[in-house]
Amino acid sequence: MPVEFDAAVFTTPEAPLTIERVSLPDTPPPGEVLVRLKASGVCHSDFHALIGEWEVPAPMILGHEGAGIVESVGDGVTTLVEGDHVVLSWTPSCRRCRYCVGGRPVLCDMVSRHSANHLAFDGRTRVTSAGEQDVYSFAGLGTFGQYTLVPESAAIAIRDDAPFEQSALIGCAVTTGVGAVVNTAKVRPSDTVLVLGCGGVGLNAIQGARLVGARQIIAADISDQKLDQARVFGATDLVNSGRENLADRVHQLTGGRGVEVAVEAIGLPRTIESAYEVLARGGTAVVAGQVADGVRISIDPFVMSDQELSLIGSNYGSSKPDVDFPLLVDHYMHDRIDLDSLVTRVIDLTDINEAFDDMKRGIGIRSVIKY
């Protein structure tokens, strides 16, 4: 018998998500696992799709930040068993292509072909509606419903004493933010770090800088409330870039030098350019924010070569989910990072549209669906 459940389904941009009855096969295909979700974060990447900034197929179950329990496993699965607690990864890896064996699984060939197109590794969907229509799953996960079928490498086993609501956030915001600092930029204790944007990713970039002992962590945002939150997560200096000139203030705070690392966690052309413009000589600007389709930026290439500046991207915090997810859970369980403060509202699935309204108004950090 198929597994039937309610899910929040996207049909067209700017329209509210609708709660619909959908189904999945109860027996996972070879190499896949059926996961019963216990929690899902509501992330800004889902909002990009919801409002039409990213073109996605429909109908689709949104959501990509989830944690749950393995319900059953398909033939050939060797690393997971029924009952395992898992965090889902939206970059499942084939573990065979040049990127996977070279230690960069988030760039896996199979991800770019299939998961990035919201499909399983065989190029098909897994969910069907009550009317037998195929339903896509965002990033191959679709966590705005209680069940999902995913490749074995998309479900990362974690310790079973960690709470699901907090663990779910490791599936996107925490890994993306912490990883941008720790893995992509490789921040050193002697570095000064600027984080532009104090939402879910930005606050975790601040946590990452604190985790590695960066000597100065400057947070920039246009919201005093978000800046107050940044202080809680480890920022040493705050800049309201809506009232102050960001470049002037950063140079003032750094003795005229600029910052060794700037992390852009918003996804806007001007803030990406600003991250690059406030670098010290030899500095690195990291683009961790997700931009709308078609966005372009402008930089001065002479300054780049003359001052040996770097402008680099960070996908999923340049992470290795098999290693980083359990490590981040351990960091949380041993009070080295704060996940409790990230969860500002726990909701039911039926409250999903209200959660996006709160996001649009800048209320809270993360709403988390509890199943």
Image: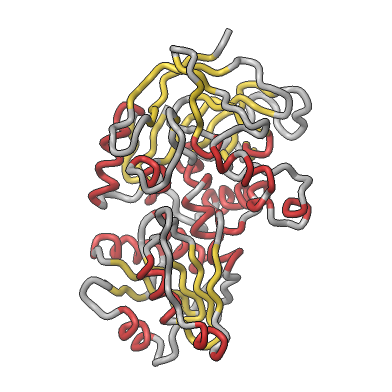
Relative to 317, 144 lies left or right = left
Q: Is residue 290 above or below residue 91?
A: below
Q: Nearer the viewer, residue 322 or 298?
A: 298
Q: Nearer the viewer, residue 347 or 312?
A: 312
Q: Please state the horizontal and vertical placement of residue 32, each as a whole percent of the image.
A: 68, 28
Query: Residue 154, located in which quarter of the rendered image?
Result: top right
Q: Please state the horizontal and vertical placement of residue 205, each as a whole percent of the image.
A: 47, 63
What residue appears at the point 29 percent right and 60 percent down from the top-left corner? 226
Q: Which quadrant is home to the N terminus?
A: top right
- The answer to whether one can see residue 169 in this image is yes
Q: Residue furthest left?
A: 243
Q: Which quadrant is home to the C terminus?
A: top left
What residue appears at the point 25 percent right and 63 percent down from the top-left corner? 223
Q: Residue furthest front?
A: 294
Q: Nearer the viewer, residue 28 or 233?
A: 28
Relative to 334, 45 lies left or right = left
Relative to 328, 293 lies left or right = left
Q: Residue furthest top?
A: 1
Q: Is residue 120 above or below residue 262?
A: above
What residue appears at the point 39 percent right and 92 percent down from the top-left corner? 256
What residue appears at the point 60 percent right and 15 percent down from the top-left corner? 26
Q: Please state the horizontal and vertical placement of residue 299, each as a whole percent of the image.
A: 45, 78
Query: Residue 248, located in which quarter of the rendered image?
Result: bottom left
Q: Please state the horizontal and vertical placement of residue 51, each as a whole percent of the image.
A: 32, 43
Relative to 309, 206 lies left or right = left
